[in-house]
Amino acid sequence: MRIKYLVVLPLLFAGAAIGGEQRSTEAKDSVGHGASDLKVAVISYSQETCTFCPGGDTEIEDRAWRAPFVTGEKLIDKSRGFIGGFVHAADALPNLSVVGINSPDSVFGGSSRSWESKESFEHFMKIITDDLRSQLPVEGVYLALHGAMAVREVPRPEAEIARRVREIVGPDIPIAGSFDLHGNEDEQFLQWADAAFVTKRYPHYDAFLQGERSALFLYRSMQGLYESTTATRKPPVITASVLQWTGQSPSMDIMERARRWEAREPDAFVSVFYGFPWSDVPDVGATVHVITNNDQDLADAIADDMADYIWRVRKDFAQGDFPMPKEAVQKTVAAISNGEVPVVLGDYSDRPGDATWILKELLDNNVSNVMYAALRDERALAALSARQAKPGDPFDMPVGGFTGEQAGKPVRITGTVKYFGEGWGYDEIAMIEFGDNNLLFIVPTYTQIRTLAPLRIEGLNPDDYDVFVVKSRVHFRRGFDETGYAKTIMVVDAPGNWFGTTRLDALDYQHAPIEALYPFQTGND
């Protein structure tokens, strides 16, 4: 039987928290002193897959839109996120070296893209495994994943990634993975890997931290100082991501409970996946992973407690009510009259990115000083490109509302081109001025605005606007809510039973056991 190793280093770096504990530099001199060089391979294969989204499967070219793959050297040259945290911690550990493994790039369109094809998965897995073999021997492997990737004919992609890596490196090399809390996982990943570290905050402020924890785990486990013992539970609960904001109960209470267990029990790691309901996969929904240092009874006790608690708060966690566009815009007009600006409207259900429900209501109510960031319409961009549009050119065409009934109908915008060209990482975006100081961003694919930084381009000052419309559920709170910037915030629903809304039972699941998950199971208790 393969022995698993895992560790907590509560006193590794002064002033930096790992799982709630403080670290000091003393451990750096005492842990691994005199050890030979330890080489860790870093791999990334990440996607949050909306299997219900239109547009067809994600193919090889959808991940190769910037380059055939991300080279190992570029992969580990990151300042933020999981890998940034991993490299940051690894750089401070003695005798530890990090080697990046060629890995697939992110998908064009992000979480608005549908199933990854089997061909694409096999293509990029070959790139990964070929490069990994060329770097052997390694003493550890770090997998920067997401958890909600959905691949045709591969029911549990992240577990399959770990399995293939395990086949290459052998039974005794420790493997750690980091995940987004929206991942869909069960016990199978930990059959092949030794540890999973999941973000505990949404927005995900702690991705960097989970990367650091992964590096510290591998550093200790490579020296045989921790015997990993795991417990996995799947409380039968499924929730829409708009309800998972950790700034509100019961989501914040669930994650605080996990942190409390980690603080109370040395060497215990408690991870919670909330799941991603728009991936039609068999392991959809909530999951609890617990890892202890050779203490199965403790692992089981913590896992049972966490699963029981999630079940106890299921009603508030899995259900929510949000205003429809008409009501939201009426409240927006009132907020403007009362000086409660800026107002931020989160168009939470629009994953394709072209829904026009809120835009139409704003136009119908003659609302001014609106910044709409952003509406997907590659057709409008193509038309602007064909005529070589430039600032000052007139703009008069219908936009959005083309991916189906969920998106509403196209809305005609008459105004002026303020900017057309490269922006936000795309070859072409457009900024259209219309009405009374209104500005519409047009982009080629679904784009989620999280902070004000992207809006400060081409001399724009967000402070000149009273209303912001963003295609986001929770991440926008990072820049507009939790900074104190916006005085009025509304998450806005859309009419109809569509993917993206909280009305998950309207979806045609083929693989996910939706009928067994609260609040959609028989009896609904």
Image (cartoon, rainbow, N blue to C red):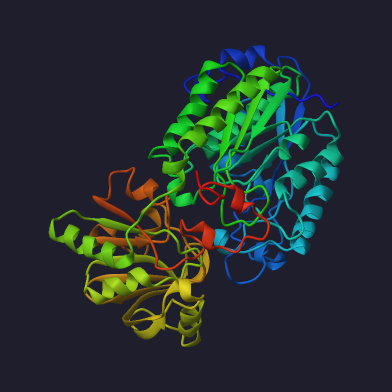
66 with respect to 425 (left or right): right
Q: Position of residue 20 (x, y in %)?
A: 49, 23
Q: Position of residue 521 (x, y in %)?
A: 56, 49
Point out residue 89 in the picture as x, y percentages from the top left corner.
Answer: 60, 30
Whether residue 377 is visible, yes or no, is no
Q: Residue at x 72, y 39 (%)?
A: 189
**Above/below status of 40 relative to 490:** above
Residue 516: x and y in percent read: 61, 48
The answer to whether residue 357 is left or right of residue 50 is: left
Residue located 70% across and 66% down the image? 59
**Location of residue 168 with respect to 149 vertically, above or below:** above
In this view of the protein, which residue sits in the foreground, 223 or 203?
203
What residue sits 86% from the left and 41% below the top? 168
Residue 223 visible, this angle: yes
Is 199 placed left or right of 326 in the picture?
right
The structure residue drawn at horizontal position 47% and vertical position 67%, both measured from the top left corner, is: 353
